[in-house]
Amino acid sequence: MENTKVLDILRGCGSLLEGHFLLSSGKHSDRYCQCAKVQQYPDKLAAVMEIVAAQAKSSGAEVVVGPALGGIVASYELARQLGVRGIFTERENNVMTLRRGFSLDKGEKVLIAEDVITTGKSTMEVVEVVESFGAKVVGLCCLVDRRAPGAELPFPVYSATGLNVQTFEADDCPLCKQGKELEKPGSRKI
């Protein structure tokens, strides 16, 4: 469900974009959320993550893990608000991994924090890393949950807001037919 207060914060920071966007899936959309824009304002990010922290508090998490790049700042802020350790994964040879001396203990309860969850692909890569250490994922957290209706994940999802986004196949996109310029704001290579 969309949270008007959060969407207003995102719009005010230039995070919530409306137009014609190329997604990493190759599909097109009418809206795009560039959470890096809100993450540049610690007070605004703290206010948004406060909503997530309130939901995730009862999870019993002992550490928050975020995938680089978008999840680093979100995971740090969530860990700060929950009073737990915060670490991040990153890709090495295109495989998600823990580096820089980070590790997890067997049985340690973990929240995974992202900026945006769309398909859950990156999130589930982090789940694999967490579980490879014998740690236990207790929830998935994000500023913006923009999964399509019915796109389920096998863990509770705690978000500051949902975001309804229309997506279109590239070869049947009404925005293309209207002649709207296509933008590629994301970080993942297609």
Image (tube, grey):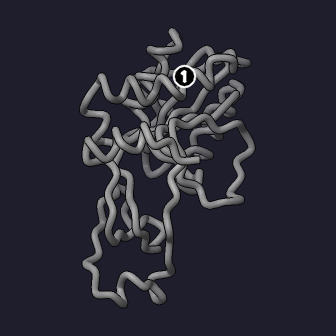
* Residue 122 point in image, percent of width and height: 53, 48
| Residue at the spot 38% in from the left edge and 52% down from the top edge | 33
* Residue 174 point in image, percent of width and height: 42, 85
Query: 98 and 159: which one is in front?
Result: 159
| Residue at the spot 45% in from the left edge and 43% down from the top edge | 4
| Residue at the spot 62% in from the left edge and 17% down from the top edge | 57
According to the image, label 1 marks what residue? Answer: 53
| Residue at the spot 36% in from the left edge and 63% down from the top edge | 189
* Residue 113 point in image, percent of width and height: 52, 33
Residue projecting furthest to the top: 83
Query: 117 and 165: which one is in front?
Result: 165
Where, by quadrant of the figure, is residue 30 drawn? Answer: bottom left
Residue projecting furthest to the front: 4
Q: Would residue 179 be found to the left or right of residue 149 on screen? A: left
167 to 50, vertically: above or below: below
Label 1 sits on what residue type?
A: Ala
**Label 1 secondary element:** helix
23 to 87, vertically: above or below: below
139 to 170, vertically: above or below: above
